[in-house]
């Protein structure tokens, strides 16, 4: 794999952009960061290690994620809260395909801090690893697949907002 | 905006330098990271979202921040503690002005872990976003404005050390 | 010190690689990230500030760390748990020696989130600073010394897995 600094940087910024988009509550903008047929999956480390398929979120396209966001905006009842993403250790660990058409394999650690609006309580809501496949479409980096593997089998209350 | 890798890197290191300066308790050195007339403000997300002006810290110059640090050193009574900054997702989202004289708009997430000296207890003390304007003075990057928007309306006990 | 972007990047990736190696439980692979005679030490901020020598881990070679990992695999009894490393603010603060043979001084903040397997509980287990000396052996970056200075004097239960 030949990874230019420019490419690596663009991939890193894509990951940061997703985090900021969620944290600034501009969830509808996530669609532009995914390819049309992207997979977005949130699954436990426990199930991943055992090849068990059950995931708490498993979207097979950009549109499916937008549906979920729509329902979060208009239908779901939940206590208002904010996320704050910390990403670390972004590593491009592989790349396959012709120059310009590579699929880049990317790993990064995350910790998600959640703040509840009503009482301001802060907690580490989730930690885990991003396992991403990134492609460039007309020079724009997008996730073709984004798998969030979270460390704990327990999710506090409910997972509403995408990680 | 034309952002060279060298410039981006220097900006990123400025943010890291601030964090390390605070965490290593060399607070007086923060002055060198600010322009003479820099704004340093710590304000809640709640107030920011509603355009409410009240901030817990609002310094209008380098000197004013140094005054605050002086009082922290000689006058304030508080339980000794340490900060540990985690920054993530440093993004230069804009830049305006003539080449060399740009004002760069920068965003980054932070989480602040606090350790109390007396019992060693560790907690996530604050999370939020850095909203910075950075300029270069004689090739040295400095904050012209540093706004810390913290997520929770509640601050545990008291905010003594700058974030 | 003349630090090329390529060198800086390789150093940063070395730190990320260590973190991912631990978090993915491939501890035996840590050896390849150290020089043969590397020092790996985990010591409190309290002791560091007072020049007190006691450390909770103090390995004087790659082999000694591997011994420790071996005992963790076959002898130690402890509750199963996972780490998730967050690193931030990687800074190369010095470099001495002839071109190609420099010893690079590196600092980075870390926060370690621990997840217990049995009940999925998540907590901030440790925070602190990495104080590293990095050299290149045949163009491969390795730690010649890795000192982990943790902020809290209290370690919850026991430190089993290297930080």
Image (tube, coloured by chain):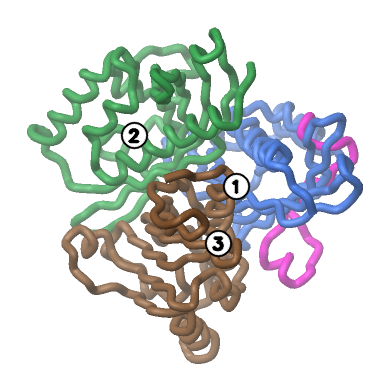
Chain colours: A brown, B blue, C green
Q: Chain of mark 2?
A: C
Residue at the bottom extreme, as displayed: A75
How far is disc 3 from disc 2 in space, using C-alphas?
33 Å
- 10 Å neighbourhood of mark 3: few (<14), some, or many (≥20)? many
Pinpoint residue B75: horizontal percent, then vertical percent.
73, 31
Q: Quadrant of residue B140?
A: top right
How far is disc 3 from disc 1 in space, using C-alphas?
11 Å
- 10 Å neighbourhood of mark 2: few (<14), some, or many (≥20)? many
Residue A88, visible in the rendered structure: yes
In magenta segment, residue B49: yes
Q: Nearer the viewer, residue A50 or A33?
A: A33
What residue is pinned by disc 3?
A: A141
The span picked out in magenta is B32-56
Q: Nearer the viewer, mark 3 or mark 2?
A: 3
Compare marks 3 and 1 and give the one earlier in the sequence.
Answer: 1
Same chain under badges 3 and 1? The reply is yes
Q: Nearer the viewer, mark 2 or mark 1?
A: 1
- Checking the image for residue A6, the label placed there is 1
Q: Is residue C113 left or right of residue A11?
A: left
Q: SS class of the residue under badge 1?
A: helix
Q: Residue at x 33, y 16 (%)?
A: C38
Q: Nearer the viewer, residue A118 or A123?
A: A123
Q: Is residue C44 left or right of residue B126?
A: left
- Checking the image for residue C163, the label placed there is 2
How far is disc 2 from disc 1 in space, using C-alphas?
31 Å
In magenta segment, residue C56: no
Q: Nearer the viewer, residue A142 or A21?
A: A142
Residue at the left extreme, as displayed: C74
């Amino acid at each position: 794999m030949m990874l230019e600094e420019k490419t690596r940087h663009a991939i890193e910024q894509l990951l940061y952009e997703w985090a900021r988009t969620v944290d600034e509550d501009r969830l509808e903008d996530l669609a532009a960061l995914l390819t049309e047929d992207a997979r977005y999956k949130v699954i436990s480390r426990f199930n991943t290690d055992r090849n068990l398929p059950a995931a708490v979120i498993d979207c097979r396209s950009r549109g499916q994620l937008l549906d979920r966001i729509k329902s979060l905006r208009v239908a779901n009842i939940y206590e208002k809260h904010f996320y704050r993403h910390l990403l670390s250790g972004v590593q491009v660990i592989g790349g396959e395909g012709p120059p310009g058409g590579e699929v880049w394999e990317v790993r990064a650690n995350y910790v998600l801090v959640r703040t509840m609006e009503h009482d301001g309580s802060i907690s580490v809501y989730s930690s885990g690893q991003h396992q991403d496949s990134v492609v460039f479409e007309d020079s724009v980096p997008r996730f073709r697949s984004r798998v969030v593997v979270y460390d704990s089998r327990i999710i506090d209350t409910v997972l509403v907002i995408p990680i």
